[in-house]
Amino acid sequence: MTRPRPLGLRPDPDDSVGAIGEFALIDRVVARSGAAAVADVGPGDDAAVLRTPDGRVVACTDVLVEGRHFRRDWSSAEDVGHKAAAANLADVAAMGAVPTALLVGLACPADTPAGWLEGVAVGMAAECAPFGAAVVGGDTSASAPDSQAVVLSVTALGDLGGRAPVLRSGARPGDVVAVAGRLGWSACGLAVLRRGFSSPIAAVRAHRRPTPPYAAGPAAADAGATAMCDTSDGLLADAGHLAADSGVLIELDRAALQQAFVDPAGPLPQVAAALGGDPMAWVLTGGEDHALVATFPAGVDLPDGWTVVGAVHEPGDAGPGVQVDGVPASRVAEELGEGAGHVHFG
Amino acid sequence: MTRPRPLGLRPDPDDSVGAIGEFALIDRVVARSGAAAVADVGPGDDAAVLRTPDGRVVACTDVLVEGRHFRRDWSSAEDVGHKAAAANLADVAAMGAVPTALLVGLACPADTPAGWLEGVAVGMAAECAPFGAAVVGGDTSASAPDSQAVVLSVTALGDLGGRAPVLRSGARPGDVVAVAGRLGWSACGLAVLRRGFSSPIAAVRAHRRPTPPYAAGPAAADAGATAMCDTSDGLLADAGHLAADSGVLIELDRAALQQAFVDPAGPLPQVAAALGGDPMAWVLTGGEDHALVATFPAGVDLPDGWTVVGAVHEPGDAGPGVQVDGVPASRVAEELGEGAGHVHFG
């Protein structure tokens, strides 16, 4: 679809990307994207050039597929931008680093309104702005010939500021396990949306725009965290990554988790009561809140926002893994009926 | 589909990614991916950590969509890996930098054979290996519910080694225009495949596995190139980027291009004769060879592999742009009947 537009008017957000073409689309999106503080060269050349004062760069990639990770009828374009950025920025924080820049690979149908993609750019820019980060590059393509879906692949870069990166493999028996951020809110919001409701809005908003505790990552690194990751797949699954990579048993305390993450006056019990569920199912297996889970040497003063929820032990006869009050995570997840976190290709 | 597998056997390449799951898939792909020389932390954590000895990092992203940029019946998995890597590594070279690492975002159907994705990883690793670069991270997802297509979004990082980046905006009147690499071979190979043929193999191979002149990028920067980009969209279109961003007129010499890029004994005239075409159409508008086009101050000794094909002038009344022997690029492209380069969302 092409149509004439009077000169001098603002770009029409209803223009399709097919009508305006790739380069005009990029111009519009870049206009919404802000500027990265570290960028010597930003969008528009073959590549961006970014300063890396630490002498190292942290880099990660996360893919969001329409119909798998978001729905355009459940989330606004800005929501999708926030969510796509947050998933990546949380991974940067989970290394103990501060985000500096994003690059975005996009495949979308030719009839996608340019305004929708501008909205995604606005959401990403807003999520990045507190760090002085921004989208510095990317590429667009038409979706596959058989598809009407948007696919976003976002790469985030970050700076460690002299910190040692906090890996998944450093947890040691005797450490405490702590969590920063929210657990179960995104899954709770998804349950609401799946039933056709749009409130409580706090839960729905948590699903649309996760709020990872970014500052808690570098703070944990500064405090001596021995291992850390974000909970994109759910606490049991992601604590499982720490346990496996560190070769330890992680014992979680259900009562501590319940007390810290299930506010009796909050949306989790309210939605669970309305829909007939258990808030702890979302806390233990719900993904996409991008809370951080870390281990610290016992006796360390935890930074603000971190709550102890368990302890690290030598692996038992069954090998490394996660338990909740002595029950293996796989059995806990089975009893909760939610499966152990998000599994793609399931 | 799941099926039992005897312990101790090698992973079966026919296993689908849906059957083995995301984490096993990642393990298999990582096993094929080699190690990046600059990686302090490689795949498997929340993010990679890479050394940036230059104090800056070059970063770019390129998207490849099945059915748009490759077909699984025309290209092997390794071909697709080579091509996806090359598209990005050429962008790094076009800044005057040397590639250090790739990150890969992947969406694919659950029934994709794991062996196909291992093949992609092998191709990427082979394309990266000469630089000591490798895949250091990424993410996988199932394709959109409506799609059976693979979408690859690759981000490349690179190091400038103390060089100033060569931008698109630095061309100045009086400069010469030069090209390194091949032009028209990928488009020629695509024409062959589209007609159902598979030879001449040199052309088909050029389409499946472009061979960008990587070393020519840093060499051009060292020689004082004033502007540079790669020809992913075709020479006329990409020279157009240099012209527009530099505010200059780029005049290309058709005879010089023909002499340098149409080998009378090579596949271009042969295929053009067989299919009824003009080799210069491919040379001028064919994309995806990832040749480099650059401008240099007149009188500079060009590095090996660079051939002068034109000159930079003050823009005329029509403003910045590209001409071939005095004819505007848009008219040249129209006469050639190929359109001005690759246009997505067309």
Image (cartoon, coloured by chain):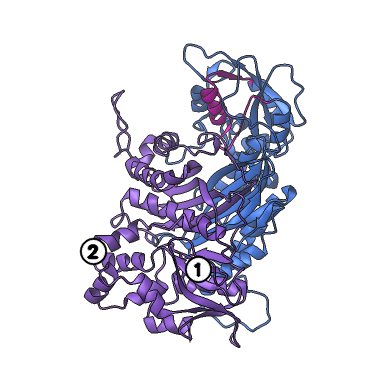
Chain colours: A blue, B purple
Q: Secondary structure at mark 2?
A: loop
Disc 1 target residue = A111
Disc 1 and disc 2 on one polypeptide chain: no
Q: Amino acid at mark 2?
A: Pro
Measuring from the top left, give residue A316's x and y in whole percent.
51, 12
| Closer-to-camera residue (A9/B323) | B323
Q: Is residue A198 visible?
A: no
Measuring from the top left, give residue A325's x and y in whole percent.
59, 17
Start-end of magenta stretch: A225-253
Q: Is residue B42 magenta?
A: no
Q: Chain of mark 2?
A: B
B273 to A105, vertically: above or below: below
Q: Is residue A303 visible?
A: yes
Q: Amino acid at mark 1?
A: Asp
| Closer-to-camera residue (A82/B262) | B262
Badge number at residue B200: 2
Q: Is residue A238 magenta?
A: yes
